[in-house]
Amino acid sequence: MIKFIAKRLGSGVVVLFVVSVLTFTLLYTASGSIAQNILGDQATPEQVAAKEHELGLDQPLFTRYFSWLGDALSGNLGASWFTNEPVANSLATRIPVTMTMVFAAMILIAICAALIGVAAAVRRGWVDRVVQIGAIIGDSIPGYVIGVFLVTILAIQLGMFPATSTISPEVGPEAWVVSMTLPVIALLINGVTGGAQQIRSAVIKQLERDYVRTLRSRGIGEREILFKHVLRSAAPAGLTVLSLQLIGMLGGVVIIEQIFALPGMGPLAVAATGQTDLPVVMGVVMYTVVVVIVVNLLVDILNGWLNPKVRVS
Amino acid sequence: MSDSVETAAVAPSALPTGQSGTVVRSTVMRRLLKNPLGIASLVILTTIALLAILAPVLAPFEENFANISKTLAAPDSTNILGTDSAGRDTWSRLLFGAQLTLLSALLCAGVAIAIGLPAGLIAGYYAGRFEAVSNWVVSILMSLPGLIVLLTIRAAFGPSVWFSMIAFGILISPSYFRLTRAAVQSVRNELYVDAARVSGLSDLSIVARHIFSVVRAPIIIQTAAIAGVAIAIQSGLEFLGLGDPTKATWGVMLSEGFKNVYLTPSLLLWPALAMALTIGGLVLLGNAIRDALEDGEKIKHRRKRGPASGPSGGSTTAAPAKARPSRKSVAAVEHGTEHHLVKVTNLGVGYPQADGSIKKVVDNVSFHVDRGEILGIVGESGSGKSQTAFSILGLLPDNARIVAGSIQFDGNYTVAPGEDRVSQERLSKLRGKRISYIPQEPMSNLDPAFTIGYQLVTPMVRVLGISKAEARTRALKLLTDVGIVNPERTFNAYPHEVSGGMAQRVLIAGAISCEPDLVIADEPTTALDVTVQADVLDLLRELQQRLNIGVILVTHNFGVVADLCDRVAVMQNGRLVEEGTVREILRNPKENYTRTLLGSMLEGKTPMTMLVSPPEGPVAHGEASRHASAEKEPVA
């Protein structure tokens, strides 16, 4: 098991490295004259050259990448070209906001999708039809459109919730939870509808397996078959579904934060993208990939625990 | 949001393997047009596409024409949906937005197909290093959140729909890759591809002719899903204000509406509605095509696959066409038949079809088994022998119906005359304890997540109510009894750690662990090597004699019957064609079909040879029913 984890961790590091090389190359070669962009159209060629030197842009790409990598390994992701704030600092203040929402939404998705999906698979009938229809509706309406309508109707028109949620945890847990409610709902609806449907098919697939019939023939009760055998075998598929949803959510949360004006990663990423603030963009990408790698590692470990075959090989 | 991007890739896809492409397409098309949702989605999508194409003609204004004196106006005769904050006509922008939105979705899907399809074909067909490398690339692409990648592309290349959609196409290409590879892998080893290769066709034409016809339908489904996701994510980017401000798109309009949400919230409604309709149309179209494909598969494989997994399965709602009155309490069995261990009388089993009819897979079958007796049920695949066995066990698929007859076990009905389902209440008390089952395929019948020991001990604890320790002792004894040399080791092993022959012995041990009166063995040796087959048969006979149990042995192999059985029943096309003692039937078969069956094996072919059944005609029917009722004749 330790060897297995080490191997997965190793491949995660390789992925991180490859993504950083690709992103760095793409950002720094495709985005035209960066210094000109920062200084504006009125800047003289001398000013531009000076700025390029200041930012290290006159160095070859190779050198620049490795100096970035060296700094990054020591925890220094550079500073914003526009605000001069260290990227690591802005990330550190914003990650908690974003991740709180993402994990709150994920936990709720996992619970709701599992309950509804399993019920639909076992009971069929109306629950099943609701899940099918829900999945179609959920697939048809992007989460941010749901977010926009939640704000418009519940916050602006009915005034039930604050439209923007810049409140920090210090104002007291109640106000904070209220302010987080709408963004989290906007984040989780697609996840619940899609997840329930996929968990449903994973469970049905297991229920149709030969060994389930054999367990029945041995006199094992339906409840025990479902909870001990079927759900355990369906769990890896469910975990994969949830981990893919989490990856998608890391993107989706950017728009949701923008809608609700939350001080998370979203506004930072959007502003940096609009201004071509490359150190910040680079930092956002790296943080995202690290989260993904950690999540995938956790899923692999859980799967190893659930499936003895993975554990052995 | 790209939640569904990656999940679309892992969704199970129905692959119509081994069907010829043109046939599939025409029937699928017909089924698609029968489905109201399929028609609705086609109508929605065609309308939107037409509006987009005709936008220059239909739109009253240029997309960026602004009437500064008329901002945020309510709908009137000039601006039928009103104007935005710059005085631009909402209806015109919606039409031009449709153009750009649909084109960008097509570009994205096109790029994804152009990369994913060839890569998947090559990886699936040749495997090897290319597959290993592409798997690695796929795992990277799939771990990148779509929107974050698009933000990076936007930072690098500026606000261009085309760049972002090409990038997203690359990012999402794994879904086509995986789909194509899976399809190719399932077809690669099919005989007809080998035949094509042997007959001298080049690799390329093999791929073109055979494999492409298999992946075509799943690719259409996937494209519908991906186009929807592409529209959602591109609009999301524009909603963030990172799109091209000179172009009218639904995302830009949504963003504009949200900025003016306090003044004119209706501006939000139109682009949101357009998006929901388009994406919804695509989702429905994909679902309808999948249903159309699965319905075909379902009818084809009904007997093997059991309950339908598709949304139109409706297994709990489908009522039998001819419902028969069910009696209030379970009647006593016919006098004079109580001594039979199992008695099946005029049994009929059927599956409700989509058109309301019932397809019979077992028809008018009668036989009985006594204690200490082995009855063989012989017949080719699809003759209904397994369905008959499962109705005794009460393990028919959910959508199966008992359409006629009764089953009694040890003097009590498990299916009384008139009942359309096996009573689970009555059978759950018998299963495991008095009736047990030995399956055909050893590996798939053990739960891979639990040790063999656990799977032997638990039924004994549940059924016999003994302690775990006692059950463990008995399990080890049973493993020794079935000829396993090192029972401790097998007890602690997971199913994947033992051989197929060993697993079958474990299943036999499990079947007799609670000392049943009746064992139903469904082709217990088919999946095993020839040498192991003989051992397992010996084992069955020895156990049967020692425990004096009744056995129903389902097989297509007369050799096994001759070796093991006392009596034999021959089934064909769901009917019982002949029944008698093994000696009688082997020496003097009365029916043509039995002679064909016997002939096909006595010619020295392997017993596994598939038989070609004579066509089902009126003569065969008459004979079948005549012999089905001859069941009461005294037998040796």
Image (cartoon, coloured by chain):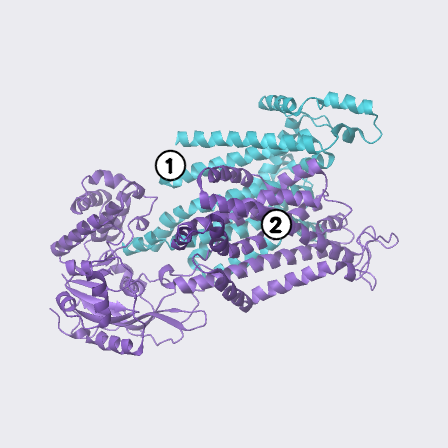
Q: Colour of chain B?
A: purple
Chain identifier, colour cyan: A
Q: Quadrant of residue B354?
A: bottom left
Q: Is residue B458 above or below residue B79?
A: above
Q: Residues within 10 Å of mark 2 (few under 14, many from 20)?
A: some
Q: Position of residue B586 (x, y in %)?
A: 16, 66
Dot 1: element: helix
Q: Quadrant of the C terminus of chain B?
A: bottom left
Residue at point 54% right, 69% down?
B34
Q: CA distance from mark 2 to mark 1?
A: 40 Å
Seen from the viewer's position, the closer of residues B221 and B511 is: B221
Q: Position of residue B365 (x, y in %)?
A: 26, 71
Which one is in front in this view, the residue at disc 2 or the one at disc 1? 2
Task: Look at label 1 and name its amino acid.
Answer: Arg
Q: Chain of mark 1?
A: A
Task: Look at label 2 and name its amino acid.
Answer: Gly
Seen from the viewer's position, the closer of residues B112 and B466 is: B112
Residue position for label 1: A311
Residue position for label 2: B110
Q: Position of residue B110 (x, y in %)?
A: 61, 49
In screen coordinates, is B149 left or right of B34? right
Please say if the residues under marks 2 and 1 sit with CB atoms less than 8 Å apart: no
